[in-house]
Amino acid sequence: MNKPAAKEEVNEAKSAGKLQVFLMIVFIPAIFLLFAGLAVFYLLDINVLEEAQEAGIPVPFLSGANETLPEGHSVTSAEQIEALQMQLKEKDSKIAELENTIKTREEENTRALADQERLNEEISKLQEEEEETSKRNNEMASVFKEMSGKTAAPVLLSMNDNEAADILRALPTDTVAKIFEKMPPADAAKYAQLLADQAP
């Protein structure tokens, strides 16, 4: 009698083992693959339920979802098209606005480049004039260097104050001192002040 009871326990153990094997080999991996697939679709931003409904496959628990919406609240293709057209118009207006902004910026850049070119030309022109003035003043200074203070003083007094100051600046200090000795004190003080003011 002991033998049949032992056989029944072995059979029960075997049948439980077969169920466990089925769960471990088939059911659990299938569930895992299902969840892994859903996770992949979620990461790819694919809604499996919507895709199934669009394909006409009835989805349990969701097949009657559209029927529960009241009349006038169901989303139709025409409404979707209209909404998409509105989005398209908004994006077109944004594109047009951005194109206008780009065009305005390009015009501003063109004007800025033209202004920069004009300023560069003015700078080069002023540099040329300054070089010519400096050259002329150096030539005049070499002439005044050869003159005596008595001869140079009246000539400088008859010149423009700034030109006279530029020439005096180009002369050695001992020559300037000799010229100042032959000038009236007020004029000598005026030119000394001009030289001090324009000193680098």
Image (tube, grey):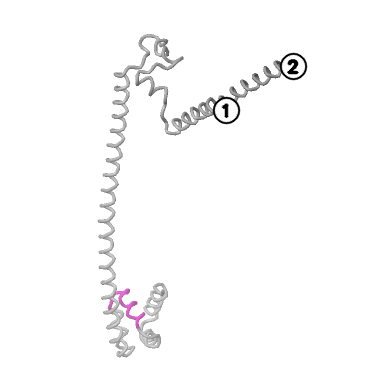
Label 2, secondary structure: give it: helix
Numbered circle sitting on residue 46: none
Residue depicted at 27% across the width and 56% down the height: 115
Label 1, secondary structure: give it: helix
Residue depicted at 29% across the width and 79% down the height: 137
Residue type of the residue flagged with mark 1: Met
| Coordinates of residue 29 in the picture (x, y in percent) | 53, 29
Whether 184 is drawn above or below 25: the answer is below
**On the picture, is 30 further left or further right than 174?**
right
Within the image, what quadrant is residue 63 found in? top left
Rate crowding at label 1 as few (under 14), some (14 to 19) or many (20 or more) other CA atoms within 10 Å.
few
Residue depicted at 34% across the width and 21% down the height: 55
* Residue at the outermost top position: 71
Q: Which residues are magenta?
A: 158-170
User: Which residue is denoted by mark 2 in the rendering?
Assistant: 2
Which callout, 1 or 2, points at the residue further toward the start of the chain? 2
**On the picture, is 20 further left or further right than 146?**
right
Quarter of the rendering occupied by the N terminus: top right
Question: In this view of the protein, which residue sits in the foreground, 108 or 41?
Answer: 41
User: Which residue is denoted by mark 1 in the rendering?
Assistant: 24
Question: In this view of the protein, which residue sits in the foreground, 6 or 36?
Answer: 6
Residue type of the residue flagged with mark 2: Asn
